[in-house]
């Protein structure tokens, strides 16, 4: 793979081009991809600022005036719900002299007022203060800058790019599958934020394989077929389970079953996988942990898995969903936000219980963070060299690496 060095003539970028050029198919990445501050900067510029980033849930800003502030690709973005219910993604940068307009992570307001000199914007980002006499400019040209925003059945995606990549195929893949889950009328029952001592790519590579699952995730593998599927084992039972699920799910208006974890498109995937018999949801004992969500009519509806590179994955069962969002905080650190969703009108202690709802993905996530931190530490050793990927069980890791290197090599 070659890379044109057009944007920057620094020796560092030339070295990165050489590094990309010698990356071998079927091998893990060389150490600088996980350690080097210049590559981390290039990741931000070429992967994160160019892509679509999962930003949160429409149900977090359910009422007009609600807003959330998210750090996305090194930018602070305010997502608001305006009076007419429409959503906006606005750069949190005052058009006067650049101060942060919103200083709390979330809130509810009629207007957004910059705390520095009081410039005031409406929820669509329009400057409401008349500045013509004092500043000599028309306020119409001084609204908050907008970022692209897509609301896919309640899942919010933002792009900070000047010319965002097409989203139409992603929406077409995700929206019909996600709609029955009613994420737009859900609530976050529980959330956890982790600071993981690992590069974001270590974390995504770990997510893209279940080679480590038998040793690491005894809870996860009791419920899921991933290990068998990647090894071509237990094919008859899996095929029977897929066929049986398909019959039922199509009758229930759900998208078709697929046993696989492969990507649907270059940077996204969406599939509904059957759970192992006895599991109607991803809980420790397989039994429901909350009321059914959205329009889903039966508990045994498998798990809808949605993934988008570079920062999102979700497992949604009939009664709850768990979303994971990554934000890089330097070459060796990633902030991970995990959220557990249930139906909006469900009540803790009556309809769901934290100690039944959260352990499955809390354990699985935390088991992963330990492994990822260990990998990052090992990559920092003078003896780390790329290792050979499994051609059966790490095909999706290779898929991630291929996508990443392509993005990184595109000026
Ligand atoms: S910087 Fe916001 S009002 Fe001055
Ligand atoms: Fe894992």
Image (tube, rainbow, N blue to C red):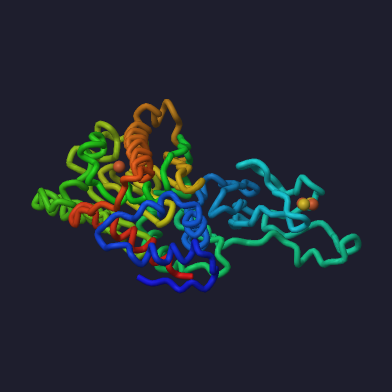
- Horizontal and vertical percent for residue 6? 52, 73
Residue at image coords 75%, 67%: 141
Residue 304 in sight: no
Residue at image coords 49%, 60%: 42
**Disc count in the image?**
0
Residue at image coords 52%, 67%: 164
- Horizontal and vertical percent for residue 48? 49, 58
- Of residues 142 and 8, the one nearer the viewer is 8
Residue 102 in sight: yes
- Of residues 289 and 298, the one nearer the viewer is 289
Q: Quadrant of residue 308?
A: bottom left
Quadrant hosting ligand 2: top left
- Of residues 246 and 309, the one nearer the viewer is 309
Q: Is residue 408 above or below residue 218?
A: below
- Horizontal and vertical percent for residue 330? 50, 47
Q: Quadrant of residue 363?
A: top left
In the rendered view of the protein, which quadrant contains the N terminus? bottom left
Q: Is residue 249 above or below residue 169?
A: above
Would you say 409 lies left or right of 303 here? right
- Horizontal and vertical percent for residue 386? 29, 53
Would you say 132 lies left or right of 349 here? right
Would you say 71 lies left or right of 235 here? right
């Amino acid at each position: 793979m070659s890379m044109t060095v057009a944007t920057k003539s620094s020796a560092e970028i030339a070295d990165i081009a050489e590094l990309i050029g010698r990356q071998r198919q079927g091998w893990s990445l060389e150490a600088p991809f996980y350690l080097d501050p210049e590559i981390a900067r290039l990741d931000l510029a070429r992967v994160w600022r160019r892509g679509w980033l999962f930003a949160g849930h429409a149900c977090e800003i359910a009422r007009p005036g609600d807003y959330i502030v998210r750090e996305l690709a090194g930018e602070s973005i305010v997502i608001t719900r305006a009076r007419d219910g429409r959503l906006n993604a606005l750069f949190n940068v005052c058009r006067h002299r650049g101060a942060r307009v919103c200083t709390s992570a979330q809130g509810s307001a009629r207007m957004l007022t910059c705390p520095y000199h009081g410039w005031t914007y409406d929820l669509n980002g329009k400057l409401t203060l008349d500045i013509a006499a004092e500043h000599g400019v028309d306020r119409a040209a001084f609204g908050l800058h907008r970022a692209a925003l897509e609301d896919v059945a309640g899942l919010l995606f933002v792009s900070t790019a000047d010319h965002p990549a097409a989203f139409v195929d992603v929406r077409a893949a995700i929206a019909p599958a996600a709609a029955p889950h009613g994420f737009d009328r859900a609530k976050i029952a529980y959330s956890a934020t982790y600071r993981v001592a690992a590069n974001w790519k270590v974390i995504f590579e770990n997510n893209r394989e279940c080679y480590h699952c038998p040793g690491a995730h005894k809870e996860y593998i009791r419920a899921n077929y991933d290990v068998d599927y990647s090894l071509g084992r237990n094919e008859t039972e899996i095929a029977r389970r897929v066929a049986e699920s398909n019959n039922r799910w199509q009758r229930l208006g759900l998208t078709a079953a697929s046993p696989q974890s492969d990507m649907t498109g270059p940077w996204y995937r969406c599939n509904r996988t059957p759970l192992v018999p006895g599991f109607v949801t991803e809980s420790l004992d397989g039994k429901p942990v909350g009321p059914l969500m959205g329009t889903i009519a039966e508990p045994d509806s498998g798990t809808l898995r949605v993934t988008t590179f570079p920062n999102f994955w979700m497992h949604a069962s009939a009664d709850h969903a768990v979303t994971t969002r990554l934000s890089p905080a330097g070459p060796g650190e990633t902030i991970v936000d995990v959220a557990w969703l249930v139906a909006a009108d469900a009540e803790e202690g009556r309809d769901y219980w934290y100690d039944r709802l959260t352990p499955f993905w809390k354990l699985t996530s935390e088991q992963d963070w330990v492994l990822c931190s260990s990998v990052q530490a090992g990559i920092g050793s003078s003896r780390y060299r790329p290792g050979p990927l499994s051609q059966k069980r790490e095909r999706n890791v290779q898929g991630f690496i291929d996508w990443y290197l392509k993005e990184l090599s595109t000026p």
